[in-house]
Image: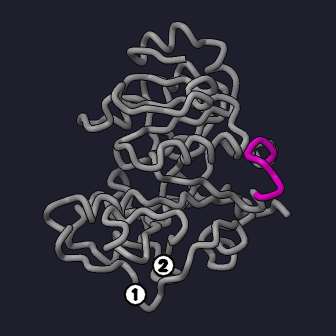
Amino acid sequence: MQYPSLNQMIKAEAKALAKGPVAIVMIEDNVEVDTTLRHNQQAGFKTIIALMPDEFSLPRDLSDAIIRVNYNMSGDAAMETALNTLIDHMAGQWVYYCYNAEYFFHPFCETRNVVEMLAFQTEERRNAMLAYVIDLYSDDLDEHPHAVSLDNAFLDKTGYYALARPDPGNDGHPKERQLDFFGGLRWRYEEHVPAARRKIDRIPLFRAKKGLRVRDDHTFNDEEYNTYACPWHHNITGAICSFRTAKALKTNPGSRYDIASFKWHNSAPFEWHSRQLLDLGLMEPGQWF
């Protein structure tokens, strides 16, 4: 079903918004739109909402299976405006959000779907799940000038680190169970990335509730949602394998001609399997075995 605005979709799709888990895909350009949507279908999300311009096309099977909303992702605060408009109407449901050309992985996702994983998260009394945005990039920028190739995707196997997240309201002391994570292309090409956009941590999966709001740095106004673990043990973390940064670096005039290749001595072919991400320490199962 297709709608001309978020508000019209909210009025017409109350039942769908109450059927979770819900995936919201924010589509910025026409790159790998269908594969992103299909990946979320296969992951087990019950309702999928695509926020995208009218001029982008979709295969008929996807058009029939998802909720499509005309939305301009190039506007100021487009991400937080869309999510904060929707959150109250999805209260009680698990919600995932991503951009096009981003692919979510959780531990053992080849044999356990997202519904099973979220059932465990609920049993753990967790209302949010941390993930790291792991940059993907093509190995040949001459053949793939926008740096996107699913068949020849690479990632950085090292170069990730975390820093304490200061609390401005507590004399800058570190926030409890919160860290800022860095690495990937945003770290290697930091001169082309604004400081506020260099973090790779995101809370892409969360349980919606009345009054919950996301901020422009992908954190929430409920600080417990921003934690990487509960107080008593480690929890599941996931990975969003994303071409978004590579696309931006090869699209923006300020960086396009400075980068001949993203490959370096710590590049590795991406295997499209959770085992590789677990082995590299880019996500962890917590207590979920």
The answer to which quarter of the image holds residue 64 is top right
The residue range painted magenta reads 110-116
Query: What SS does tag 2 mark?
Result: strand
* Residue furthest out toward the left: 254
Left/right of residue 96 with respect to residue 147 in the rendered view: right
Q: Which residue is mark 1?
A: 264
In the image, residue 139 sits, relative to residue 250, either above or below, namely below
Visible residue check, residue 45:
yes
Left/right of residue 75 with respect to residue 122 in the rendered view: left
Visible residue check, residue 209:
no
Residue type, label 2? Asp
Residues under labels 1 and 2: Cα distance? 8 Å
Look at the numbered discs 1 and 2 and tell me whether their residues touch, using CB distance below 8 Å: yes
Q: Position of residue 6 (x, y in %)?
A: 42, 18
Quadrant location of the N terminus in the rendered image: top right
Left/right of residue 276 with respect to residue 192 in the rendered view: right
Query: What SS does tag 1 mark?
Result: loop
Residue at the image position 51 percent from the left and 7 percent from the top: 11
Q: Is residue 111 magenta?
A: yes
In the image, residue 264 sits, relative to residue 164, either above or below, namely below
In the image, residue 181 sits, relative to residue 99, either above or below, namely below
Residue at the image position 29 percent from the left and 36 percent from the top: 77
Given residues 106 and 153, the one toward you in this image is: 153
Q: Is residue 39 magenta?
A: no
